Image (cartoon, rainbow, N blue to C red):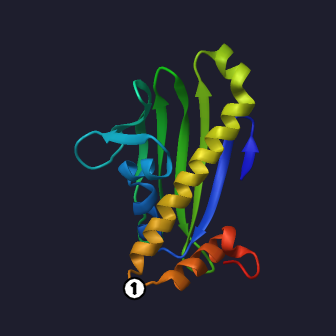
Amino acid sequence: MSRSRSAFVLRRHTPLSPAAAFAAVADFRSHAQGVPFTHVQTDPGQPAAGWSFTAITALGPLAFHDSMVLTRWEPPGPDGLGGYALRKTGRILAGWAAVDVAPSASGGSDVQWAEQIDLRPRALATLTAPASHWAGARILWRALDTLLARAELAAVPERGPEAERGAVRERGGADSREGGA
C-alpha cells in the first residue's frame, strides 16, 4: 500500500483472468462481504457510467450511507485492460475511487485500487485525517482481498484445504511464513 496525501493505492496480483478479476472487483453488492455491518443497495440494471450504489453500514439504529456514482465503466477488452471509476456523493463522505485491471506478464492479472476519501465538513476532515486515512485503507484492503479470494476459490471449485492454504501463501497472507499452519 502506498500513500499520496489523503489518497491511497492498493495493488494485488491474482491468478484470475482480467475478465474474472474485473467481475470480482465490480460486484458491488459483494463489496460489503469484507466490511462488517455493511450491505450495498444498487440501482436496477447493469453498471454503466451514471449508475449509482450506496454502501450502508449500520450498528443498531445508527446508520452511515456512502453513496457513489460510476463515472467510468470499461470491462476488459481483448487487450485485457479494464476498470471503473466512481465519485462519492454522500453528505459525510466525498472523494473518488479508480479500480483498474490489467493482464500480468507473469500470468493472471494485476489489480490497482486507488481511492481518496474526504470527510465533510472540511474541519472534520482535517481533524480526523490520519485516523480516517488509516481506517479507510484497512477497510478497503480487506474488501479487495475478500473479493479476489472468493473469486479465486470459485474459479477452481475442487480445491481443498491444502490448495486454499497455498492460495493464502501466494497472496502473502498469514500462512506465507515458512512452516505456516
Answer with left or right where residue 106 lies relative to residue 40.
right
Tag 1 secondary structure: loop
Task: Answer whether residue 3 is visible to the viewer in this image.
Answer: yes
Which quarter of the rendering shows the C terminus? bottom right
Vertical comparison of 112 with 122: above or below: below
Please tell me which residue lies in front, 179 or 75. Answer: 179
Answer with left or right where residue 3 lies relative to residue 141.
right
- Write the residue at 45% across / 84% down: 159
Q: Which residue is disc 1 drawn over?
A: 158
Please provide percent x and percent y for residue 1: 71, 53
Please provide percent x and percent y for residue 170: 64, 76
Please tell me which residue lies in front, 71 or 148. Answer: 148
Answer with left or right where residue 172 lies relative to residue 160.
right
In which quadrant of the rendered view does residue 11 lie? bottom right
Answer with left or right where residue 29 lies relative to residue 1.
left
Q: How many marks?
A: 1
Please provide percent x and percent y for residue 75: 40, 59
Vertical comparison of 142 with 172: above or below: above
